[in-house]
Image (cartoon, rainbow, N blue to C red):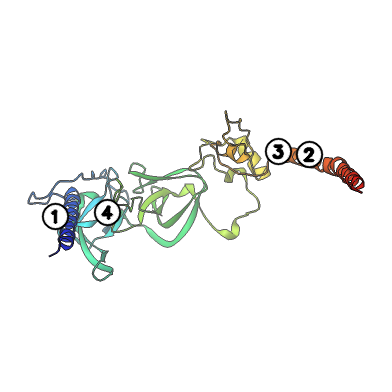
């Protein structure tokens, strides 16, 4: 064997060992301690608060209920090998069998050999499951939030708060239930876990959709044909907006916005401007940016432009024409 081939083989083996070592390290870091005591124990989520529903509960549909936001382990066998998939709070599973400590359910996992999703069975610790209430199932519809509201894991304001909605945002409803003369809407939301394996909140969930419950009084059915897009009332303008640095809109500001269709706020000039450009100023503004032609700047531009035009047409052009004529006469 030549030195080149020998070196290539050594590098290949070293690379294989390196990846194998990384794989073992990652696997052992995520390994759950099984009944035999083997493996490295990982940080587990705390079971959610045990709540007794005041309505009829399902005997086959369960919702994942955890106190913190950590993912719940899914096993290939009861208490045995840990699957690469997991469950997050708000996931809903259909129980195929309820065992002493585990619940068996079916989900789809990706088979790398077949290059397709295949159905398989998983087992989850019963401590992390709460029976879902029997509710009136309806075709999924979008609803608009008319008042800031919290989303709870169960139709009970003492259960885990999983999300909050701001006025004006929309939510997809999947059904409803009435408890103590109060109607709750089952709301659907995304997983919330990262898909990047290097992120701290990474989790490969068996189900992407998660659910929670919201007070029906905070929602209004969204029907496009009934929405007047040419005008907006003060009640339709939210006092707070997600991702906005402005904490709250006052009633006076909302009234101006409803009347004019836009709102202009005085912003003090920045202490310095790196570039002699209006765009640089807008980069210093923390609130929402709507870049348009500034009235005073545009007026100053028009005056200066007309001034230059007058000087060119009435002063520079006649003088240049006169100077050129004199040059021609001198040459002759």
Query: Does 260 sit above or below residue 268?
Result: below
Indicate which disc residue 87 carries: 4
Residue 99 vs residue 179, the one in the foreground:
99
Q: Secondary structure at mark 2?
A: helix
Q: Secondary structure at mark 1?
A: loop
* Disc number lying in front (1 or 3): 3
Q: Secondary structure at mark 4?
A: strand
Query: Residues under labels 3 and 4: Cα distance?
Result: 57 Å
Using the rendered image of the protein, determine whether residue 182 is visible from the camera's viewpoint: no
Percent x, y of residue 314 = 88, 42
Tell me whether circle 3 and circle 2 mark residues in contact (CB < 8 Å). Answer: no
**Residue at 83% of width from left, 40% of height from top?**
311
How many discs appear?
4
Indicate which disc residue 79 carries: 1
Percent x, y of residue 158 = 34, 41
Query: Does 79 sit above or below residue 67?
Result: below
Q: Secondary structure at mark 3?
A: helix
Reading the chain from its start, which is encountered first: label 4 or label 1?
Answer: 1
Residue 321 vs residue 91, the one in the foreground:
321
Query: Residues under labels 1 and 2: Cα distance?
Result: 80 Å
**Residue at 35% of width from left, 53% of height from top?**
191
Query: Which residue in the protein does label 3 denote?
Result: 297
């Amino acid at each position: 064997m030549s030195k080149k081939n020998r070196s290539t083989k050594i590098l290949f083996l070293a690379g294989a060992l390196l990846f194998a070592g990384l794989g073992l390290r990652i696997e052992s870091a995520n390994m759950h301690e099984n009944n035999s005591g083997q493996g490295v124990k990982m940080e587990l989520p705390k079971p959610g608060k045990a709540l007794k529903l005041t309505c009829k509960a399902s005997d086959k549909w369960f919702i994942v209920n955890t106190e913190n936001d950590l993912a719940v382990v899914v096993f290939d066998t009861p208490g045995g090998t840990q699957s690469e998939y997991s469950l997050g709070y708000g996931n809903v599973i259909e129980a195929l069998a309820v065992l002493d400590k585990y619940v068996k359910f079916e989900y789809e996992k990706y088979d790398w050999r077949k290059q397709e999703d295949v159905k398989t069975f998983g087992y989850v610790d019963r401590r992390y499951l709460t029976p879902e209430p029997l509710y009136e199932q309806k075709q999924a519809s979008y609803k608009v939030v008319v008042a800031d509201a919290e989303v709870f894991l169960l139709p009970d304001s003492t259960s885990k708060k999983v999300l909050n909605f701001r006025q004006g945002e929309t939510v997809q409803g999947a059904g409803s239930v009435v408890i103590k003369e109060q109607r709750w809407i089952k709301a659907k939301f995304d997983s919330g876990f990262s898909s990047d394996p290097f992120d701290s909140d990474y989790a490969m969930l068996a189900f992407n959709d998660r659910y929670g419950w919201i007070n029906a009084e905070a929602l209004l059915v969204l029907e496009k044909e009934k929405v007047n897009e040419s005008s907006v009332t003060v009640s339709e303008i939210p006092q707070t907006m997600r991702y906005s640095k402005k904490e709250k809109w006052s009633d006076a500001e909302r009234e101006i916005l409803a009347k004019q269709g836009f709102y202009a706020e005085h912003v003090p000039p920045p202490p310095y401007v790196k570039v002699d450009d209006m765009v640089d100023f807008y980069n210093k503004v923390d609130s929402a940016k709507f870049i348009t032609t500034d009235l005073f700047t545009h007026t100053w531009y028009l005056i200066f432009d007309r001034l230059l035009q007058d000087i060119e047409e009435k002063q520079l052009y006649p003088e240049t024409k006169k100077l050129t004529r004199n040059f021609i006469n001198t040459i002759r």
